[in-house]
Image (cartoon, rainbow, N blue to C red):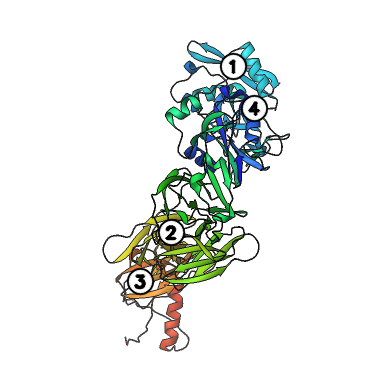
Amino acid sequence: MDYSLIIFVLTGALLGVASAQTHQYYFVSTPLNWTSAQSFCRQDYTDLVTIENTADVDAVINTSLTYTGLVWIGLHDDFINSWKWSLSDSSFYGEGQTTFRNWYLNQPNNLNGQQYCVTLLSGSPFFGTWDDVDCSLERHFVCYNGTTNGSPSYVVSGTSLNWTEAQKFCRENYVDLASVRNQTDNTIIANLAAGDFVWIGLSRQKVWSDGSNSSFQFWVNGQPNSGPEQCVAAAMNDSGRWSDEDCALSLPFICYAPMVTSSTCVETGCPSGMECLSNNAVVQCIDPCDNYTVLNDDWRSVNNTNNTTLHCDQHINWEGWYRLYLGQSSAQIPEQCIEEQRCGTHHPLWINGSHPTQTNEIVTRTVCNAWVGSCCYFTSHTIQVKLCYGYYYVYKLAQPSTCSLAYCTAPHNAEDFRASGQNETSITLQWNKLNNISSFIFQFNGTETNISAPDGPGVITHTVSSLTAGTKYTFTLIYVSHGVRSNIIQLTAITAPSNPESLKPLNQTETSITLQWNKANNTNFVLELTGSETSITAPDGDGAVTHTVSSLTAGSKYTFTLFSVFENIRSSGVSITAATAPVNAEGFGSSAQTETSITLQWNKVNNTNFVLQFNDTETNISAPDGAGAVTHTVSSLTAGTKYTFTLFSVFENIRSSGVSITAATGPHFVFGINVRLESLTRLSETELEDAVAELFRKYGVPPEVSISVRSVKP
């Protein structure tokens, strides 16, 4: 039997000074972004690591014997909470006064990653607002000189110094660099600065995730150097030196927890997922995932039916934790009954239960044995199991009740078996390959499918089609090694629901659009508009769903996308474009009237045509090109009659609410006039009418007046 001890846990100081240790550090190999790494450490340990001295730097490097890249540590930029006033006297500040800020537009921005000090910008167009700048710049500055008659006294220096030198000068000659507690202080200092840019006492440093005040720094030359890179990583291949990095990067990381030594470890126990173990004669809480013995016996394989040499694990003095291998691949104890005469023994041992699925817990499982047709013939016993990051198990094994009983090993279950995509009729499944495993059995709906892994590393993908929308399905995946099936791993996944049906605009006003669609079974909805999303819960009962989107702009097109949502899975989405109603035309009125017509006039509205409604008829009117008013004459009217006209603006076939006016035609007059004409020749009645019309026009009678000449005998 071959054993080899692998120990990865190291502590926050050299083991030679164990009595002074306070922290224990943990290397987590799973790459996460900085925020996720912080959450992980706070959940399973204490926090991301704080580094306070070079001994801590050495301890961080020693947490991994093989990894040489970047790891996240707890240092990061906090533009909101990391600003501190140089004057720390709490009696100087009233409630909330330490947090008064007067930033200029889009400040602070940490341009080029070196802006840790603050300048007050006086004069136009800044008017006393603040800017974060490089502390090495030389500027005039304002010192606080105590109070006079209860009011703060400030002194503007005519000397230009960098921020640190200005702070030193103020502390040696006055009290400190000026603190600005409120708008009154800000106005006083801005007036004193008289258009100059001056240092005030506000500055910041990068902060530690756990709130530590450590000022220790260990930067790579030229770091920190970039504004967008707000989180800090340590280079394991460069003596642990620091650089600022984009917080969205996925990197391994270092967590820490308080050191629990023999004085408290045995008495009070350890945090979840850890155990009180001896490491180099020091008893402390250690994660068994980092402190185990490798158990790599080929005869333990479930495929082994050769019992020429019988093995019995009752003779082994099991101590500590063990990780199982088959060849070069991680393995595990089977979860199902193994037929007798396998695994190099008469009575194979298997776990009666499932392996843990959470990485921060140690679970207890019952171990059974197979003999004469029974899967648990002899007295059972218990062992402890933990799932480790990197997806392998470690076991705290115990002696079985008799001989010949021995633990079996089976190929490891699929790593990260997951649904990578869904639509209404199919689910795509994915899992990671394991070394030396090339065959899988996929079970679904009472059928089995044999799947061969492609060559090379990477993931395996399998799509199940012809499914029903918005439905839960259970899939089973089994590894096959040398013709023998490994443990079963199951996954429940869901098809996307059907898209909502009959999505349409129900009502539009100048500032809102009401949408309507049909309900779908067991689904809620998400409505997407211009990058924002609104979750909508379907009402109880039957009927359509309605939702009103408000605060829109009149006469504008909007595209809405609606998703059905079932168990957090969205449909593909259905989109419609709808428009708000345009505004009503302004300046609507009558500009001229005759006995038989009325001319209407109104102002144009952008991108709209019009509908004029009167006497139960409608007329479509296109707006003319260019600027100016729109005119329209309504003819064939009755003289001396009132008419009501309603005008609608129209955009994308959507009408405005409409505006109405009342206007009247002119009255009809009949009058007679005696005119004496002298002519050298006799005139016809038509010639007489033309002569009279010319006379009337000469005296301003409108041309609409009709003239009829009749001869009358004297």
Give the vertical position of 366 relative to 301 (above or below): above
Identify which residue is drawn at 49% across, 28% down.
99
Give the vertical position of 294 relative to 543 (above or below): above
Three-letter amino acid code at disc 1? Asp
- Give the CA distance from mark 1 to mark 3: 77 Å
Q: Earlier in the sequence, mark 1 or mark 2?
A: 1
Identify which residue is drawn at 71% across, 39% down.
237
Q: Which of marks 4 and 1 is nearer the N terminus?
A: 4
Report the side of 617 relative to 272 (left or right): left
Proximity of marks 2 and 4: CB atoms separated by less than 8 Å: no
- In depth, the one of 318 and 6 nearer the eye is 318
- Give the CA distance from mark 3 to mark 2: 85 Å
Proximity of marks 4 and 1: CB atoms separated by less than 8 Å: no
Proximity of marks 3 and 4: CB atoms separated by less than 8 Å: no
Residue 118: x %, y % from top left: 61, 28
Label drawn at residue 55? 4
- In depth, the one of 141 and 194 nearer the eye is 141
- Give the CA distance from mark 3 to mark 4: 88 Å
- Give the CA distance from mark 4 to mark 1: 35 Å
Q: What element carries label 3?
A: strand
Label drawn at residue 613? 3
Three-letter amino acid code at disc 2? Cys
Q: For residue 133, say whether it is visible.
A: no
Residue 349: x %, y % from top left: 46, 53
Q: Nearer the viewer, mark 4 or mark 1?
A: 4
Give the residue number, with chain letter if any, for mark 2: 337
